[in-house]
Image (cartoon, rainbow, N blue to C red):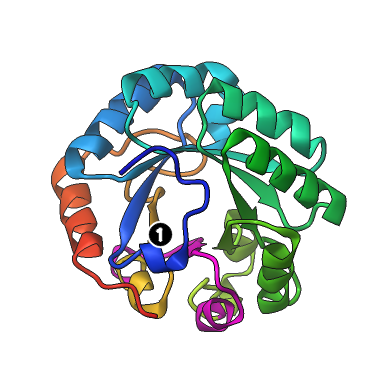
Amino acid sequence: MSPSIRGLRRSDLTHGIVQVSLDLKTLDDALRMAAIAVEAGADWLEIGTPLVMAEGLRAVRTLREEYPDHPLVADLKVMDGGYGETRMFAEAGADAVVVMGRAHDATVQRVCEAGEEFGVLVMGDDMGADDRVAEAKRLEDLGVGMVIHHIGHDHRNMHRELKLSPLTDLPGIVAATTVPVQAVGGLSIDQAVGCPAIGAGVVVFGAPLAIDDETSFTIPERDLPRILGDAIARVHATPVST
């Protein structure tokens, strides 16, 4: 797959593809995890928020040099200064950036303007929205090229009694939008593998499969290449529902 994913359409995704999140604190660990992910068949690599905070543009440049043919997603969680931040990471080699739906309309629009100018896919994250279906539609109307349906780590763990899952609203979000969709936040491997059948064709593997936990941000010490490879093969074999 070309690293140029700007303009990706839902119809381009006939079967599921996999994005592996490098939610790690050091570049050395990120490169080690990236090598495992690519060997296992990952399609996209995500410079996760911890890695963005710890290593920033250096992580993007290094991964771009190491993996020239893999799309790189920078999970910036942009809340302001959208044009400038998007431009910085695009020029470093990122192929996609994430803007938060909770940001002002102007910020989402400025990120989309930079995405258009610098050839970057803009992913809009609905985390924290009261009406997630309406938020997904708003993000598409503002110009994002992909919707991330996201149930936040802190929220779902603080309110376990609510049994929060991105699968709850996912069919409605897919129905309300035309751009590609991904769902993240507490999914099991089986649930993640099932997302393409609901219409969410870009599947993300991060914690707890690819990351040991979301406090220490370390690579799990188990048979990760086999487990990740099996999960990725299952996603690749799953048609994306239209």
Q: Is residue 143 left or right of residue 74?
A: right
Instruction: Return the residue nearer the eye: 6 or 230.
Output: 6
Instruction: Return the residue nearer the eye: 6 or 78.
Output: 6
Residue placed under numbered mark 1 in the picture: 202
Q: Is residue 136 left or right of residue 62?
A: right
Identify the residue at horizontal 55%, vertical 21% (top origin).
92
Q: Is residue 141 above or below residue 72?
A: below
Instruction: Return the residue nearer the eye: 137 or 188.
Output: 137
Q: Secondary structure beneath disc 1?
A: strand
Name the image quarter holding the C terminus. Answer: bottom left
Region of the chain picked out in magenta, as a range: 169-191
Name the image quarter holding the N terminus. Answer: top left
Residue 88 in view here: yes
Q: Is residue 107 above or below residue 50?
A: below
**Magenta span includes 33:** no
Quadrant in the picture for residue 101: bottom right
Residue 104 in view here: no
Quadrant in the picture for residue 212: top left
Identify the residue at horizontal 57%, vertical 80% (top origin).
169
Identify the residue at horizontal 25%, vertical 62% (top origin).
235
Q: Is residue 69 above or below residue 134?
A: above
Q: Position of residue 204 (x, y in %)?
A: 40, 54
